[in-house]
Amino acid sequence: MAHAYTPGLKVMPCTMFRKRRLLPIPGKVLAPICKTWTGCDVSANMLKYAAKRLQAFSNVRFVELSGYDLKPVASESMDVIYSTVVFMHLSEWDRYNYIEEAHRVLRRGGRLYVDNISLTTGYGWKFFQASRAIPPSDRPPQIGSTSTPQEIEVYLNRAGYKNIKVSIVDDAWVIGCAVK
Protein backbone atom coordinates (compact mmCIF):
# COMPACT_ATOMS: atom_id res chain seq x y z
CA MET A 1 0.00 0.00 0.00
CA ALA A 2 1.29 3.46 -0.83
CA HIS A 3 0.72 6.11 1.78
CA ALA A 4 0.72 9.86 1.90
CA TYR A 5 0.14 12.38 4.58
CA THR A 6 -0.29 16.12 4.81
CA PRO A 7 0.85 18.77 7.32
CA GLY A 8 1.34 17.96 10.96
CA LEU A 9 4.21 15.50 10.83
CA LYS A 10 7.76 16.73 11.25
CA VAL A 11 10.05 14.90 8.85
CA MET A 12 13.82 15.16 8.85
CA PRO A 13 15.22 16.15 5.44
CA CYS A 14 15.67 12.98 3.42
CA THR A 15 16.92 10.83 6.28
CA MET A 16 18.15 7.45 5.12
CA PHE A 17 17.79 4.49 7.43
CA ARG A 18 21.12 2.76 6.90
CA LYS A 19 21.12 0.32 9.80
CA ARG A 20 17.79 -1.30 9.09
CA ARG A 21 14.63 -0.74 7.12
CA LEU A 22 12.07 0.92 9.39
CA LEU A 23 9.09 1.06 7.06
CA PRO A 24 6.28 0.31 6.69
CA ILE A 25 5.09 2.51 9.50
CA PRO A 26 1.46 1.60 10.14
CA GLY A 27 -1.21 4.24 9.70
CA LYS A 28 -2.16 3.79 13.35
CA VAL A 29 1.28 5.14 14.29
CA LEU A 30 1.21 8.10 11.90
CA ALA A 31 -2.47 9.10 12.00
CA PRO A 32 -2.30 10.57 15.53
CA ILE A 33 0.56 12.92 14.55
CA CYS A 34 -0.69 13.97 11.10
CA LYS A 35 -3.32 16.47 10.07
CA THR A 36 -4.38 13.97 7.39
CA TRP A 37 -3.16 10.46 6.55
CA THR A 38 -4.14 8.94 3.21
CA GLY A 39 -3.79 5.26 2.37
CA CYS A 40 -3.79 4.22 -1.30
CA ASP A 41 -4.02 0.75 -2.81
CA VAL A 42 -5.21 -1.01 -5.95
CA SER A 43 -7.21 -3.43 -3.83
CA ALA A 44 -10.57 -2.29 -2.51
CA ASN A 45 -10.38 -5.21 -0.07
CA MET A 46 -7.07 -3.99 1.38
CA LEU A 47 -8.52 -0.50 1.75
CA LYS A 48 -11.51 -1.92 3.66
CA TYR A 49 -9.11 -3.80 5.94
CA ALA A 50 -7.07 -0.62 6.52
CA ALA A 51 -10.23 1.40 7.19
CA LYS A 52 -11.31 -1.12 9.81
CA ARG A 53 -7.91 -0.96 11.52
CA LEU A 54 -7.98 2.85 11.51
CA GLN A 55 -11.66 3.39 12.32
CA ALA A 56 -10.76 5.23 15.55
CA PHE A 57 -9.20 8.09 13.57
CA SER A 58 -11.21 10.84 11.90
CA ASN A 59 -8.25 12.20 9.92
CA VAL A 60 -7.67 9.21 7.64
CA ARG A 61 -8.91 8.65 4.12
CA PHE A 62 -8.50 5.91 1.56
CA VAL A 63 -8.05 6.08 -2.19
CA GLU A 64 -8.35 3.19 -4.61
CA LEU A 65 -5.74 3.41 -7.38
CA SER A 66 -5.66 1.98 -10.89
CA GLY A 67 -2.28 0.33 -10.45
CA TYR A 68 -0.65 2.70 -12.92
CA ASP A 69 -0.92 6.20 -11.48
CA LEU A 70 -2.14 8.48 -8.69
CA LYS A 71 -4.86 10.24 -10.74
CA PRO A 72 -7.45 10.24 -7.92
CA VAL A 73 -5.05 12.27 -5.74
CA ALA A 74 -5.03 16.04 -6.26
CA SER A 75 -1.90 17.79 -7.53
CA GLU A 76 0.32 19.41 -4.89
CA SER A 77 -1.78 17.99 -2.05
CA MET A 78 0.76 15.93 -0.07
CA ASP A 79 3.87 16.70 1.96
CA VAL A 80 5.25 13.17 2.17
CA ILE A 81 4.63 10.06 0.12
CA TYR A 82 6.05 6.67 0.97
CA SER A 83 5.63 3.56 -1.10
CA THR A 84 6.95 0.41 0.48
CA VAL A 85 6.76 -3.21 -0.70
CA VAL A 86 4.90 -1.97 -3.80
CA PHE A 87 7.50 -1.65 -6.57
CA MET A 88 8.18 -5.40 -6.65
CA HIS A 89 4.66 -5.82 -8.04
CA LEU A 90 5.07 -3.26 -10.84
CA SER A 91 6.78 -3.21 -14.20
CA GLU A 92 9.61 -0.74 -14.77
CA TRP A 93 7.30 1.63 -16.67
CA ASP A 94 4.77 1.67 -13.87
CA ARG A 95 7.47 2.22 -11.22
CA TYR A 96 8.60 5.31 -13.07
CA ASN A 97 5.01 6.41 -13.59
CA TYR A 98 4.38 6.29 -9.83
CA ILE A 99 7.54 8.30 -9.14
CA GLU A 100 6.50 10.87 -11.74
CA GLU A 101 2.95 10.97 -10.40
CA ALA A 102 4.26 11.41 -6.85
CA HIS A 103 6.13 14.48 -8.11
CA ARG A 104 2.82 15.89 -9.36
CA VAL A 105 1.03 15.11 -6.08
CA LEU A 106 3.74 16.41 -3.74
CA ARG A 107 3.80 20.02 -2.64
CA ARG A 108 6.97 22.00 -3.26
CA GLY A 109 9.59 20.69 -0.81
CA GLY A 110 7.60 17.46 -0.35
CA ARG A 111 9.47 14.21 0.23
CA LEU A 112 9.25 10.83 -1.46
CA TYR A 113 10.39 7.44 -0.15
CA VAL A 114 10.31 4.28 -2.31
CA ASP A 115 11.81 0.84 -1.86
CA ASN A 116 12.14 -2.53 -3.55
CA ILE A 117 14.17 -5.70 -3.24
CA SER A 118 17.56 -4.94 -4.76
CA LEU A 119 18.97 -7.23 -7.42
CA THR A 120 22.45 -6.16 -6.26
CA THR A 121 22.15 -7.73 -2.80
CA GLY A 122 22.62 -11.31 -1.65
CA TYR A 123 18.94 -11.61 -0.75
CA GLY A 124 17.84 -9.92 -3.97
CA TRP A 125 19.95 -12.24 -6.11
CA LYS A 126 18.49 -15.32 -4.36
CA PHE A 127 15.00 -13.91 -4.89
CA PHE A 128 15.76 -13.30 -8.58
CA GLN A 129 17.19 -16.80 -9.07
CA ALA A 130 14.26 -18.46 -7.30
CA SER A 131 11.82 -16.58 -9.54
CA ARG A 132 13.87 -17.35 -12.65
CA ALA A 133 13.83 -21.05 -11.77
CA ILE A 134 10.06 -21.17 -12.20
CA PRO A 135 9.26 -22.13 -15.81
CA PRO A 136 7.79 -19.12 -17.65
CA SER A 137 4.52 -20.95 -18.28
CA ASP A 138 4.16 -21.56 -14.51
CA ARG A 139 5.13 -18.10 -13.22
CA PRO A 140 2.23 -16.41 -11.46
CA PRO A 141 1.28 -12.98 -12.86
CA GLN A 142 1.94 -11.33 -9.49
CA ILE A 143 5.50 -12.67 -9.22
CA GLY A 144 7.76 -10.07 -7.67
CA SER A 145 10.60 -8.36 -9.46
CA THR A 146 13.70 -6.56 -8.26
CA SER A 147 15.21 -3.13 -8.85
CA THR A 148 18.74 -1.76 -8.81
CA PRO A 149 20.02 1.39 -7.13
CA GLN A 150 20.81 2.80 -10.58
CA GLU A 151 17.21 2.24 -11.74
CA ILE A 152 15.73 4.07 -8.76
CA GLU A 153 18.24 6.92 -9.07
CA VAL A 154 17.50 7.37 -12.79
CA TYR A 155 13.74 7.48 -12.16
CA LEU A 156 14.12 10.09 -9.41
CA ASN A 157 16.46 12.22 -11.55
CA ARG A 158 14.30 12.02 -14.68
CA ALA A 159 11.15 12.91 -12.72
CA GLY A 160 12.80 16.12 -11.50
CA TYR A 161 13.54 15.38 -7.84
CA LYS A 162 16.36 17.00 -5.86
CA ASN A 163 18.48 15.84 -2.90
CA ILE A 164 18.31 12.27 -4.16
CA LYS A 165 19.69 9.57 -1.91
CA VAL A 166 19.68 5.90 -2.85
CA SER A 167 20.94 3.27 -0.42
CA ILE A 168 21.11 -0.47 0.12
CA VAL A 169 19.76 -1.63 3.48
CA ASP A 170 19.86 -5.02 5.22
CA ASP A 171 21.54 -6.69 2.23
CA ALA A 172 18.08 -6.79 0.69
CA TRP A 173 16.49 -3.43 -0.01
CA VAL A 174 17.19 -0.52 -2.32
CA ILE A 175 15.72 2.64 -0.81
CA GLY A 176 15.27 5.92 -2.67
CA CYS A 177 14.53 9.20 -0.96
CA ALA A 178 14.16 12.57 -2.66
CA VAL A 179 12.65 16.04 -2.42
CA LYS A 180 10.41 17.81 -4.93
Image (cartoon, helix red, strand yellow):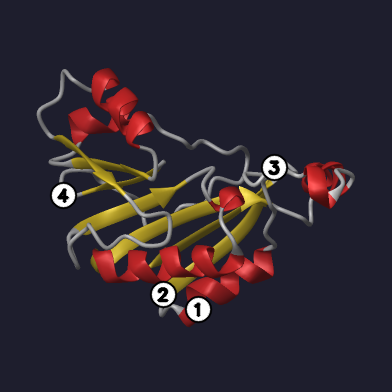
* Of pointers 4 and 3, the one earlier in the residue sequence: 4
Assign a secondary structure to mark 2. loop
**Residue at x 26%, y 64% (from the top left corner):** 105
Indicate the amino acid at tag 2: Tyr
Residue 100 location, x and y as percent?
40, 71
Assign a secondary structure to mark 4. loop
Indicate the amino acid at tag 1: Asn
Residue 170 in the image: above or below residue 65: above
Q: In this rendering, would 171 be left or right of 100? A: right
Indicate the amino acid at tag 3: Pro
Label placed on residue 7: 4
Inspect this view and state whether residue 128 appears: no
Label placed on residue 140: 3
Residue 8 location, x and y as percent?
16, 44
Separation of marks 2 and 4 at Cα, in angstroms: 20 Å
Comparing 116 with 9, the one in front is 116
Indicate the amino acid at tag 4: Pro
* Residue at the spot of label 2: 161
Q: Residues within 10 Å of mark 2 (few under 14, many from 20)?
A: many
**Residue at x 30%, y 54% (from the top left corner):** 80
Q: In this rendering, would 127 be left or right of 9? A: right
Separation of marks 2 and 1 at Cα, in angstroms: 6 Å
Closer to the eye: label 4 or 3: 3
**Residue at x 71%, y 53% (from the top left corner):** 118
